[in-house]
Amino acid sequence: MTARGAQWALVGLVLATVDARPALAHGFAFTDVTLALRANGTFAVDIACDVDALALGVDNPTHSAALAGQIRSMPPAEQDALVARLAEMLGRRVRVRFDGEPAPFSVSLPERGRPQASDASPSALGFVARLEGKVPAGAKTATFFASRAFPPVRLTVVSPDGRKGPVEALERGGESRPLDVARATAPEPPAATAARFLRLGFGHILPEGLDHILFVLGLALLSGRLPTLLAQVTAFTLAHTVTLALAVYGVVSLPSRVVEPLIAASIVYVAVENLFRQRASWTRLALVFCFGLLHGLGFAGALSDLGWPSGRRLLALLSFNAGVELGQLTVIGLALAALWASSRLGVPRRPVERALSMAIAAVGLVWTVQRLS
């Protein structure tokens, strides 16, 4: 491959992400799950989701009426076969473990065939998949796991005495902490809270935060010296930590329809500035701090329904931000390694920086338009 070909291959790789990601990239989509440990020795798991889309294998159910109509048009035997395949899929992708061993469960759809209110979203199979089984005799602990096929899980546990515990957020493909079967609503240890939110923060950058990745990549493309780059990233982190904390504690709030287009516009600005500057300035550092304030509000909007652990909100907040910082540093490391590799292939660094900046600006512009529409 020629030097120019390698350069434009990198550009194409960035531009290809426009159609692969949604316009609002800061949002956390959750799967709400309730795990009830019953006094009669059984358990029930209610998974709130668009069951029609799950059964048909549709990732982004934007046409619920069409999906419901498709299922209703099937002969009864074909509908039953579809539900059977759904139950088999849930058996592979979901685990309820007691003392580390998976427990068998049956699958039912309690809302299937129920009459719906006129203002309800259309569905043939409903919006709840229920898993039921027996708690093994003498079991001490229970855990819940959903595969990466599901969005991050927001888990609520109900103890045998009927008490609801605090909401626990699980990263995509994560498993809950071991829960005492008799006292399932007891709080988790502080170290477990910190580790969980650290992983959530890292995952919100890699691989989920494409707009955040492109912003940090835009910083890396202009900063030839590592100390200058780290100064910008630190300013960015401090800024989004401040606004995220203020938003979490209810001091500031802006609607996502305002914040998200501005975040996309910040990506455009950083990328375009790269085309006209040879090195970062103190003005750039101040702007990066201001953009960090915006991104913090974006995080706050995404995390507003996360379910902060009772009495440990500050610990969770700091751990989440530490995870974000680790994700940013990983992006920077990968970017610098890629630029070094392209130089070793004989591709001059400045043309690569300019080409990638143009691609990032194009992606940011598309997102700005999408988020304003």
Image (cartoon, helix red, strand yellow):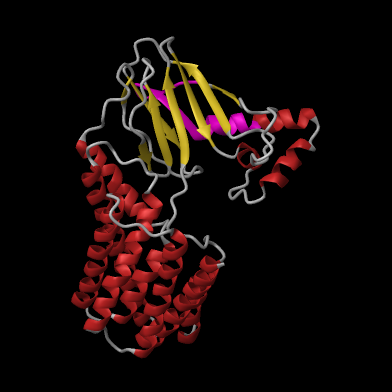
Dividing the picture into quadrants, the one containing residue 348 is bottom left
Q: In which quarter of the image is the C terminus?
A: bottom right
Residue 6 makes an appearance in the image: yes
Q: Does residue 232 lie above or below 281 as drawn?
A: above
Image coords of residue 367 (percent x, y): 50, 69
Q: Nearer the viewer, residue 10 or 153?
A: 153
Image coords of residue 60 (percent x, y): 59, 50
Q: What stretch is highlighted in magenta?
A: 85-104
Image coords of residue 74 (percent x, y): 79, 36
Which residue lies at the image location 45% right of the left edge and 21% below the top edge?
103
Is 249 on the left-hand or right-hand side of 27?
A: left
Q: Does the magenta stretch include residue 87?
A: yes
Which residue lies at the image location 24% right of the left edge and 60% below the top edge?
242
Which residue lies at the image location 20% right of the left edge and 39% below the top edge?
191
Which residue lies at the image location 60% right of the left edge and 30% below the top edge?
88
Dividing the picture into quadrants, the one containing residue 281 is bottom left
Q: Which of 43 and 353 is in front in this view?
A: 43
Image coords of residue 371 (percent x, y): 51, 66
Q: Does the magenta stretch include residue 225?
A: no
Q: Does residue 103 lie above or below 209 as drawn?
A: above
